[in-house]
Image (spheres, rainbow, N blue to C red):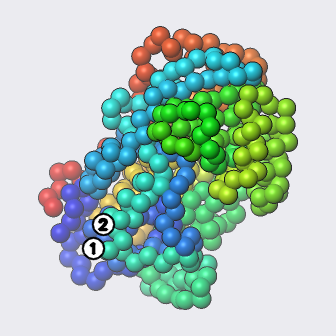
């Protein structure tokens, strides 16, 4: 039986075996729909267990229909964070403006969701864990494609053959590197570096975001509900990506500390908390832009194929929609080449529109010059008296196929 929303694969009996690399968001979503369409799915994940924690993420527009069809929309609504205000501060910690978060990001009031990344990951894993094989603590090291399938050698030493392989292993995808070459070919650097971590909520913040700015530097404290823990962000403009720091956690902490050495407000305390944090994540801000998302019997989905950067707020939504569209294409076409072509044709424009949102988020949150910062602050003051902004058309620019199909 084929689920509503996925095309039928008529006249076939043997289950096609698919390896999905990555158990974040796009991987389990793809696994769910492929299993429903009759595939035998294995998910390999280098982490030893499903990852919890992580910065809050957004589910918007077309992606809401994906989670509705998966049956998890009510539970995600229960997990909705419901941030109530976003307060912008100047260099001395004085208030510039306090606005509805939707006035900055845009969104459909009462519909768009913001949830802890770990909550979404846990829901997706629970949805598929009894139907899909998971290999935690392992990874696909080499892929050897041939006419009959893909021979995969895992880091653990095990070897297996699959009909298809899909890389859902994030922006720094090993699968992409194996198929297409070094990340530098596809990574479009956007001029910022960031560090995220958790720290104690000693500020009494609740359901809110506080964002401090000077030109080219920003520090944010994000209170998810009434938790005694805050998500912290230190973001800064860096003309060239610091490649050496990306491979050295100590160098990352030193770089961030040096950039914010003269910062005011509560930033010194945040830098101290960063040095002690055991969950620090440091990276550059960039997008993955590729002319094709497949090669032979292997394809990419989510951030591995088209990371839009956190400046767009659309990474999770693209991952959910892309996974659905890839599953639909594979269910509709027995020939993988035709399926991958249909997948790219169906998603490419949606990806392009959402990646183009980056300029909007960059200008609003992280101006790099004093003039741009003053213009941003003037805009924020105007927003105080205006209703929340409408959601960008890009969020809902794709209509999922298959609603007229008979289960």
| Residue 335 visible in the displayed image | no
Q: Residue at x 72, y 32 (%)?
A: 266
Quarter residue 233 falls in:
top right
| Residue 198 visible in the displayed image | yes
Q: Position of residue 184 (x, y in %)?
A: 71, 56
Closer to the camera in the image, 349 or 17: 17
Establish if 339 lies above or below 153: above
The answer to whether residue 109 is left or right of residue 197 is: left
Q: Position of residue 241 (x, y in %)?
A: 78, 48
Closer to the camera in the image, 79 or 239: 79
Q: Residue at x 35, y 48 (%)?
A: 76
Establish if 122 lies above or below 116: below
The C terminus lies in quadrant: bottom left
Q: Residue at x 33, y 64 (%)?
A: 127
The single residue placed furthest to the left in the displayed view is 406
Tags 2 and 1 in contact by the CB under 8 Å rule? yes
The answer to whether residue 182 is left or right of residue 310 is: right
Closer to the camera in the image, 314 or 256: 256
The answer to whether residue 103 is left or right of residue 7 is: right
**Mark 2 residue element:** helix
Q: Residue at x 57, y 59 (%)?
A: 170
Q: Nearer the viewer, mark 2 or mark 1?
A: 1
Q: Position of residue 81 (x, y in %)?
A: 43, 40
Which callout, 2 or 1, points at the residue further toward the start of the chain?
1
Q: Which mark is residue 38?
A: 1
The N terminus lies in quadrant: bottom left
**Mark 1 residue element:** loop
Q: Which mark is residue 331?
A: 2
Q: Position of residue 328 (x, y in %)?
A: 32, 60
């Amino acid at each position: 039986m084929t689920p509503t929303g996925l095309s039928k694969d008529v006249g076939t009996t043997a289950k096609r075996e698919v390896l999905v690399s990555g158990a974040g968001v796009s991987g389990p979503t793809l696994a769910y729909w492929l299993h429903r369409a009759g595939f035998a799915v294995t998910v390999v994940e280098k982490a030893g267990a499903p990852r919890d924690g992580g910065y809050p993420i957004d589910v918007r527009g077309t992606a809401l229909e994906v989670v509705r069809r998966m049956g998890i929309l009510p539970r995600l609504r229960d997990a909705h964070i419901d941030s109530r205000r976003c307060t912008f501060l100047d260099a001395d910690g004085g208030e510039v403006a306090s606005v509805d978060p939707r006035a900055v990001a845009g969104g459909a009031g009462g519909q768009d969701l913001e949830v802890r990344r770990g909550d979404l990951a846990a829901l997706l894993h629970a949805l598929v864990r009894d139907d899909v094989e998971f290999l935690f603590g392992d990874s696909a090291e080499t892929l050897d494609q041939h006419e009959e399938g893909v021979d995969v050698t895992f880091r653990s030493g095990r070897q297996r053959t699959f009909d298809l392989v899909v890389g859902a292993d994030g922006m720094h995808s090993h699968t992409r590197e194996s198929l297409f070459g070094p990340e530098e070919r596809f990574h479009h650097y956007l001029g910022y570096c960031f560090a995220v971590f958790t720290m104690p909520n000693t500020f009494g913040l609740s359901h809110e975001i506080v964002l401090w700015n000077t030109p080219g530097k920003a520090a944010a404290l994000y209170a998810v509900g009434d938790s005694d823990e805050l998500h912290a962000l230190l973001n800064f403009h860096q003309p060239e990506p610091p490649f050496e720091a990306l491979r050295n956690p100590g160098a990352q902490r030193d770089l961030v500390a040096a950039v914010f050495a003269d910062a005011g407000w509560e930033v010194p305390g945040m830098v101290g908390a960063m040095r002690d944090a055991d969950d620090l994540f440091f990276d550059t801000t960039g997008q993955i832009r590729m002319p094709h998302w497949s090669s032979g019997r292997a394809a990419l989905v989510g951030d591995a194929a088209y990371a839009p950067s956190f400046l767009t707020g659309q990474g999770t939504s693209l991952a959910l929609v892309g996974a659905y569209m890839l599953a639909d294409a594979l269910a509709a076409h027995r020939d993988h080449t035709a399926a991958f072509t249909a997948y790219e044709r169906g998603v490419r424009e949606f990806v392009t529109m959402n990646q183009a949102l980056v300029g909007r988020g960059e200008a609003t949150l992280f101006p790099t010059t004093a003039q741009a910062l003053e213009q941003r602050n003037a805009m924020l003051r105007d927003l105080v008296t205006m209703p929340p902004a409408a959601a960008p058309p890009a969020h809902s620019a794709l209509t999922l196929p298959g609603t007229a199909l008979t289960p």
